[in-house]
Image (cartoon, grey):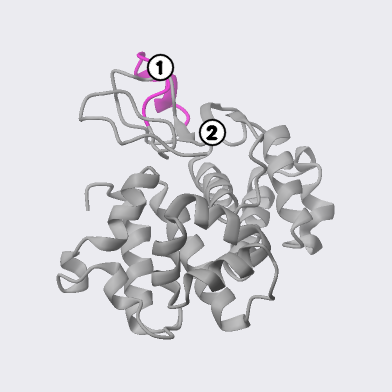
Amino acid sequence: MARREAAPRGAPPALGTLTTVRAGADSSSCASCGLGLSIGSYSDIILVMPMIQIRSAEKPFANASLYQQAVAAISRADAMGLLPDAETIESLTRRTMARVLSHIMKAGIGRGLYKDLADPSGCDVPRLEKLLAQVNDALEESPAPAYEWPRLVQVLGVDRLAGLLGISRSSVRRYKEQARETPDDVAARLHFVALVVGDLAGAYNDIGIRRWFERPRTLLDDRAPADLLTAEWSPAGPGPKKIRELARALVAAPAT
């Protein structure tokens, strides 16, 4: 589902951007929840992604650190293609989070946590925060090419994705259609790109994400991220590590 072009400064956030704004005009409406949301004139949406428009966060997700863990899990799952296209999330509650977690578990990720997370209503905040941190770690360490190929082709396109991964366009198509098994090294690079896209969703829509990979960055010595992903690069390499650090920083500083 394509995201719209980023809106001009001062316009309401466009669908497909992960953004935080105040949930109400009254300054007390979110100050007490500890989310640190910024004031904006278009203040009815806290979080926006395709089919994910979080307008409210109920207890216990009003807790700042728990909110961050929950949003991280949602954005990573979305970038990895684990959430169905029809999945709609408008409120961050125990029930909706349990639904997101069920999709993650169906992909074979974090199954050992399923018993505790299947019904989050039985968890207190510290326990739930710890479990969600474990889910995020599991997402970080779990390439899921069968899900990630369709999602990343949707976001980046075949040509750009092939260039970032250092493979041919025909290989992208074959792997996406599962006509050939994705090699482990390619799956690792694909997963790295998915995680970067998940981080960038906090600041950009799909068009912005595509441009981000091509534009020189001061923190990368005036090189574009795509320039550091050359040949058969490894996610553990120094260039990719810098790219990931930069993408993570954009969640807190969208203008970087």
Q: In the image, which is nearer the foreground, mark 2 or mark 1? A: 1
Q: Which label was assigned to residue 62?
A: 2
Q: Amino acid at mark 1?
A: Gly
Considering only order in the chain, which callout, 1 or 2, is on the residue closer to the N terminus? 1
What percent of the width, then of the height, locates residue 75? 52, 48
- List x then y, in percent, for residue 98: 73, 41
Is 32 part of what is drawn in magenta? yes
Which span of residues is magenta-colored? 21-33
Vertical arrangement, residue 115 with respect to residue 40, above or below:
below
Q: Quadrant of residue 174?
A: bottom right
Residue at (77%, 37%) from the top-left corner?
Answer: 121
Per the image, the residue denoted by label 1 is 24
Number of residue marks = 2
Tag 2–tag 1 contact (CB < 8 Å): no
Residue 184, quarter of picture: bottom right
Q: Where 163 sits versus 146, above or below?
A: below
